[in-house]
Image (cartoon, grey):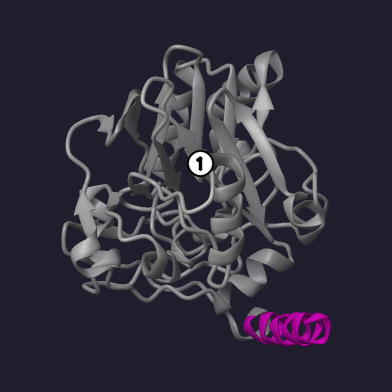
């Protein structure tokens, strides 16, 4: 592959992924029609890479039949407005994600002290404000993916109110979004090296742990043979099934942080957005440490640009 293609990877038949710094997007092609969709919108500024990948796979001037979002966090929607300048397509998401994609409500704020690690601390900088996708946005209806009859929609809330995963029964291929991830997203070391470790959803950005646990149990029951997540490399076969089963059985110990804003009480949301947030558990000493870490990380990022 050319250098610009070094982060492209194949997941399964008709499924390809692209790693954008620390988050993945996916392109899925229908076996019968040859049509394809984009799953998730990556980070802001990544539209060029996404378009180049699509043209490498499907030909010059191609465009997806639709864009489907597993959820609307900043790292999964960042390039959408840029992409819409090139592709005038419909963007679909679960109805409970609509408030955050139509300008109605911010997401629950991150919990930078949940799970530890530099990535958790820097999450205080992550944007949680809504965007407005206007007329291009539509709510998903039913349990099938538009233009992709092989794929089913599985509601997997917890990491966000309207989070979904996508599943193809014919070969047991799962696109999990952030319902679970395949690297330890709280750790900068894991994020940089992409070391494989099947984990629950990112601790610092998950506001409902009861729902998150139920979602992992639901996905483990499918016994997928291949799985691609929003963060980390794909996993396959017995390794995937055993680790996912273990996560479902021991979710409280492995996934839920020992302490944090949402551990004892979840954020409550409805079709209009946030209804209630638990009080923040921040303390001055930890807040000071976080600010220092954030400043240092920002300086490093600026120096590398």
Find disc 1 in the rendering and name its residue. Answer: 27
Task: Point out the image quarter for the N terminus.
Answer: top right
Q: Position of residue 123 (x, y in %)?
A: 59, 71
Residue 264 vs residue 22: left or right? left
In the picture, measured across the screen, residue 220 lies left or right of residue 228, that is left
Q: Residue at x 68, y 65 (%)?
A: 119
Prevailing SS of the magenta stretch: helix
* Quarter of image, res 88: bottom left
What residue do we see at 72% from left, 84% from top? Answer: 298
Q: Is residue 161 above or below residue 173?
A: below
Q: Is residue 296 magenta?
A: yes
Front residue of 12/29: it is: 29
**Which region of the structure is painted magenta?**
287-305
Q: Position of residue 46 (x, y in %)?
A: 58, 66
Q: Residues within 10 Å of mark 1 (few under 14, many from 20)?
A: many
Q: Is residue 80 left or right of residue 15?
A: left
**In the picture, residue 166 is in which quadrant?**
top left
Kindly identify the residue that appears in the image at 58 percent across and 65 percent down. 48
Location of residue 59 with respect to 101 vertically, above or below: above
| Disc 1, SS | strand
On the question of residue 218 being in view, the answer is no
Percent of width and height locating residue 152 = 33, 26
């Amino acid at each position: 592959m050319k250098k610009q293609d070094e982060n492209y990877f194949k997941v399964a038949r008709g499924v390809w992924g692209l790693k954008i710094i620390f988050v993945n997007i996916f392109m899925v092609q229908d076996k019968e029609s040859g049509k394809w969709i984009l799953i998730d919108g990556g980070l802001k500024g990544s539209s060029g890479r996404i378009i180049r990948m699509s043209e490498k796979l499907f030909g010059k001037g191609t465009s997806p039949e639709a864009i489907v979002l597993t959820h609307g966090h900043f790292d999964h929607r960042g390039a959408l407005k840029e992409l819409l300048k090139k592709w005038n397509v419909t963007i679909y998401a679960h109805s409970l994600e609509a408030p955050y994609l139509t300008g109605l409500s911010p997401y629950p704020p991150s919990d930078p002290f949940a799970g530890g690690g530099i990535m958790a601390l820097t999450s205080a900088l992550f944007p949680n404000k809504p965007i407005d996708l206007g007329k291009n946005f539509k709510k998903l209806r039913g349990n099938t993916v538009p233009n992709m009859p092989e794929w089913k929609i599985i509601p997997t809330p917890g990491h966000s109110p309207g989070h979904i995963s996508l599943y193809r029964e014919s070969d047991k291929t799962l696109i999990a979004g952030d319902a679970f991830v395949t690297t330890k997203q709280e750790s900068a070391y894991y994020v940089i090296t992409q070391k494989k470790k099947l984990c629950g959803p990112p601790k610092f950005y998950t506001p409902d742990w009861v729902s998150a646990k139920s979602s992992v149990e639901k996905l483990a029951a499918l016994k997928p043979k291949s799985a691609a997540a929003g963060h980390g490399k794909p996993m396959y076969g017995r390794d995937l099934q055993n680790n996912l089963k273990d996560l479902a059985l021991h979710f409280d110990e492995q996934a839920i942080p020992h302490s944090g804003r949402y551990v004892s009480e979840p954020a409550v949301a409805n079709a209009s957005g946030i209804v209630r947030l638990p009080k923040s558990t921040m303390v001055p000493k930890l807040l000071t440490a976080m600010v220092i870490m954030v400043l240092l990380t920002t300086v490093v990022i600026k120096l590398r640009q």
